[in-house]
Image: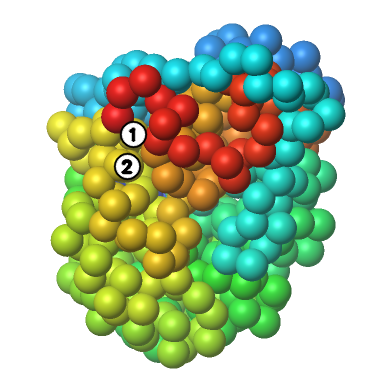
Amino acid sequence: MNATRRDVMKLIGAGALGSAMLPRVAAAQGAGAAVPAAAAGASNAERDLTIVNFDMLEEEARGLLTPGRFAFMGPAGDGWTYRENRRAFGDYPIMPRRLQGISDAAIDVRTQLLGQGLPFPMITAPMGAHGMIHAGGEVVTSRGTGAAGTLYVSSGASNATMEDIAKATSGPKWFQIYMNRDMEINRWLVQRARAAGYTAIVLTADALGPGQSDEFIRLGRPFPPNLRPGNHDPARGGRGNFFELKRDLSFGDIGFLREASGLPVVVKGVVHPQDIRQCHAAGASAIWVSNHGGRQMDGVPGAISTLRDAVDAVAGRVPVVFDSGIRRGIDVFKALALGANAVALGRPVLWGLAAGGAGGVKNVYAHLTGELRTALLLSGVAKVTDLRREHLARI
Ligand code: FNR
């Protein structure tokens, strides 16, 4: 796929994913250097981490990556939504129960998602261009997620091909699509995903417009030109132009993806109750409440503030996945108490990837699972599947 000048201009308008995929505009690093551009400034770490908290892990990742690669993960606009994603968890204090006769041995964090057993209610969110973070890219992230035993959602904007990612993970996997204007490319992508062993298609609905980190722009959008969307790379059997994004997504696309793939379709990035009801009517098999980690449109509410109404709109008919701002075990507790079935981790996975490769990703899950188990124990709740709104002081 050739990213022509026209592609580049479209891409600038394509927001978070577009900014990630831009060929380098300012020479930030790498040209002519001995280190391959994919690796220059990216991590090649592979080790176990001792994680105290994700704020400290973020700082570790910041120290390991060049500023441009770190800014790739930054928020859109003023970062108001990004900050609100964290702050708004404070609107839902936990109401613990005491003297419930529950010991460590009784704590059970296992759950189910679309018929898939998970060891804990956390999965890896789709994120593009892991080659920006680690020289091994998505193959390393998916290996780490599989080693943790949980589900990997492969981004349509991955640098590795979906087949290589599928082979690298021992866990379950879903494929996330950024729909193309060419519907035959969409059909080909989801059929390819099914053949590679992905068991659901995630339609991302909230990444259409401008929205990129000011810092990434200030640094000249330092995206190494050789980090391409892997699924479309002709040298690796790919076709179609990733950057020809379908902007006019509609509820009808849910049915198209279902029919084309024969797989359940999960709609990611919907928050308005009416949209959620329509997604369900159009055949969505799960709803993924998210604001893209504040990386698309600034000014929308913190994601956790939208979860309760979204869950009410779903009315128990299909599972609900939640992401944006999960950093603590108590955040997972709150999201599940509000009615989510599982949460997805975004940046913490990339920070773990930067600091420790596949081992670091696995450690991210072990750390958060430990915090979640503690939160359950100290709240007198034995099973994550028992979490209800009554476990919150206010909703
Ligand atoms: C993303 N996200 C994202 N979402 C998606 O559906 N497809 C994608 O390709 C990407 N790419 C992407 C890149 C980077 C660097 C980030 C940080 C995020 C959004 C992602 O799936 C998820 O919604 C958020 O990351 C969750 O928020 P937190 O956990 O990062 O706060």
Left or right: 93, with 137 as reference point = left
**Disc 1 to disc 2: CB gap under 8 Å:** yes
Left or right: 317, with 329 as reference point = left
Mark 2, other Cα within 10 Å: few <14 / some 14–19 / many ≥20: many
> In the figure, 98 relative to 155: above or below?
above
The residue indicated by pointer 1 is: 304
Q: Residue 21, how many percent across, how many down?
A: 41, 49
Q: Residue at x 59, y 59 (%)?
A: 113
The residue indicated by pointer 2 is: 307
Name the one closer to the observer, 147 or 186: 147
Res 243 seen here: yes
Residue 297 position by quadrant: top left
> In the figure, 195 relative to 121: above or below?
below
Please name the amino acid that badge 2 sits on. Leu
> In the figure, 292 relative to 208: above or below?
above
Q: Residue at x 29, y 69 (%)?
A: 279
Residue 93 position by quadrant: top left
Q: Residue at x 51, y 49 (%)?
A: 341
Mark-to-mark CA distance, 1 and 2: 5 Å
Which disc, if any, is residue 57? none
Name the one closer to the observer, 119 or 148: 119
Please name the amino acid that badge 1 sits on. Ile
Mark 1, other Cα within 10 Å: few <14 / some 14–19 / many ≥20: many
